[in-house]
Amino acid sequence: MKIIAFILSFITYPVFTFAQRNVNEFLQLQSPPQTYYVHPVTDAITIDGKDNETSWSKVPWTDSFKDIEGSNKPAPTLETKVKMLWDKENLYLFAKLQEPHIKGYLKQKDTIIYHDNDFEIFLKPNLLSPEYIEIEINALNTVMDLLMTKPYRFGGRANLNWDTKDFESAVYHAGSINHPQDKDEFWTVEMKIPVKSLKYFGEGNQIKPNEIWKINFSRVQWHYDNSETVYSKRKDSNGKTLPEENWVWSPIGLVNMHYPERWGHIKFIDAANQQPIDEQFFAIEKVTWNIFYLQQIYRNDQKRYATSIQELSKLYPEIMNERKNYDIVFSNSNNFYRIEIKSKTQPKLKTTIDSRGNIYF
C-alpha cells in the first residue's frame, strides 16, 4: 500500500516517518482490533482459488473490510472478506473481492504489487518479536513477499530477498480480466502458508491449538477510467494520479498498514480447545502503545518528553484511569525515556517501552 513517504533507492519501497501530532490523531487509534477464531481443516484443501471443499463451507467469513482510517471515513464501495483454516503445518486463507472490472498487469515476482489493485496479508506469528511478514498478490496471481525486521517508522528494513518457502496461491476470476468492455463479479485468492516458512529456529514448525497471531489484510483499489479497449488510472485536474483506496479487515486509524500493534488477532482452535482469547495481554499492550503515542504528542508540544503519567494526562485525562490496573514508572534522561507498565493483579504481566519504539514483554 502506498503511503506519503520517502523512497528507499535500493528496493523502491516506502519508509514511514509518521508521528501522532495531536490528540485527535491519537483518538483515531483507539478502535478495538478485530478477532477471528481459525478452525481446523476436515478434508484436504486444493489450492485452486475456489472454496468448494467441505472445510471452507463450515467456517465463517470475517466482517467486511472497512476503510483503513476507520468509521470516520466512507465505507468501501466494494465488498471484501476473508475466511481461514489451519492444520499443524499450514495456515489457509481464502479472500473474496467484489470487482466489476477485474484487472492486473504486473507479472514479475517481487515487483511492488500494490501498483496494481491487490490483496495483502500481514502476519506476525511471534507476538513478542518485532519481525513480521507481508505478502501482496494481484489478479494475475503475481506475488510479492517480504520480511520486515520491524516497522519502517522505527528504522525497519524490507527484505525482498526473503521468500515464504513452499507458499502456494491461486486466483479465480468470476468474469474476465483486462476486458473493459464487459462487467465482472469478483475475484478470489486462496493461499497455503507453511508455518515452517514463518518461524525461526527454536520456535517450532507447527501450529498449536490456542496459539494466537497478529494478522491483518488490506485491499488496495485504484480509481480507473475505462474505454472499450483499455483501463487507465484516473487523474485529477493537474494530471496527477488519484490516490488509491485502502480497505482493511481491522482498521488502523491512519493510512499506514505498518502499525502491527493495531492489527487484528487470530486464535487457532479445535473441537477440544475453543476458549475465547484472553484479552489481558492485549489490554496491557494497548495501554503501553497509548502512552507511547501520547509521548510523541507531548514532545511535539513541549519539546521534551513527559516524566510522569500526570503530565500526559494534560493531553488526555482518561490516561489517569490506567493507574487503577497498572503501576506505571517513567525513567527519563535528556531526549530518551523508558517506561515500565506492570499489572497490579498479575505481577508477571508487564511491558517496557522506550522512546525509540522498542517494546519488551
Image: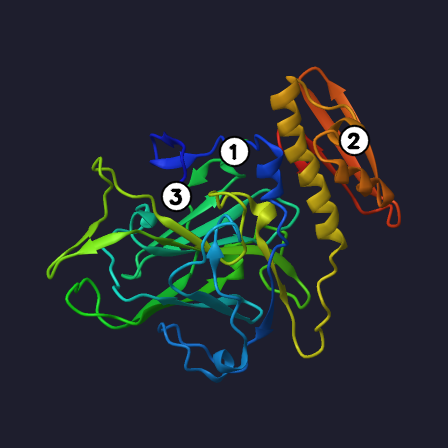
Contact (CB < 8 A) between labels 1 and 3?
A: no
Q: Is residue 144 left or right of residue 232?
A: right
State the separation of the CA atoms marked 3 and 2: 43 Å
In this orientation, which residue lies closer to the viewer: 65 or 356? 65
> What residue is disc 2 on?
309
What amino acid is found at the position of numbered circle 1 in the picture?
Answer: Arg
Which element is circle 2 on? helix
For the residue carrying disc 1, how many other residues have a C-alpha within 10 Å: few (<14), some (14-19), or many (20+)? some
The residue sitting at 31% across, 65% down in the picture is 99
Residue 91: x, y in percent?
Answer: 52, 65
Residue 62: x, y in percent?
Answer: 53, 67
- Height in image: 149 above or below 133? above
> What residue is disc 1 on?
153
Q: Quadrant of residue 338?
A: top right
Residue 283: x, y in percent?
Answer: 73, 50
State the separation of the CA atoms marked 2 and 1: 24 Å
> What residue is disc 3 on?
161
- Among numbered discs 3 and 2, the one appearing first in the sequence: 3
- Among numbered discs 1 and 3, the one appearing first in the sequence: 1
Residue 47: x, y in percent?
Answer: 39, 72
Which element is circle 3 on? loop
Quarter the C terminus occupies: top right
Residue 106 visible here: no
For the residue carrying disc 3, how many other residues have a C-alpha within 10 Å: few (<14), some (14-19), or many (20+)? few
**From the viewer's perspective, is the residue at label 3 or at label 2 nearer?**
2
- Height in image: 305 above or below 344? above
Residue 214 visible here: yes
Contact (CB < 8 A) between labels 2 and 1?
A: no
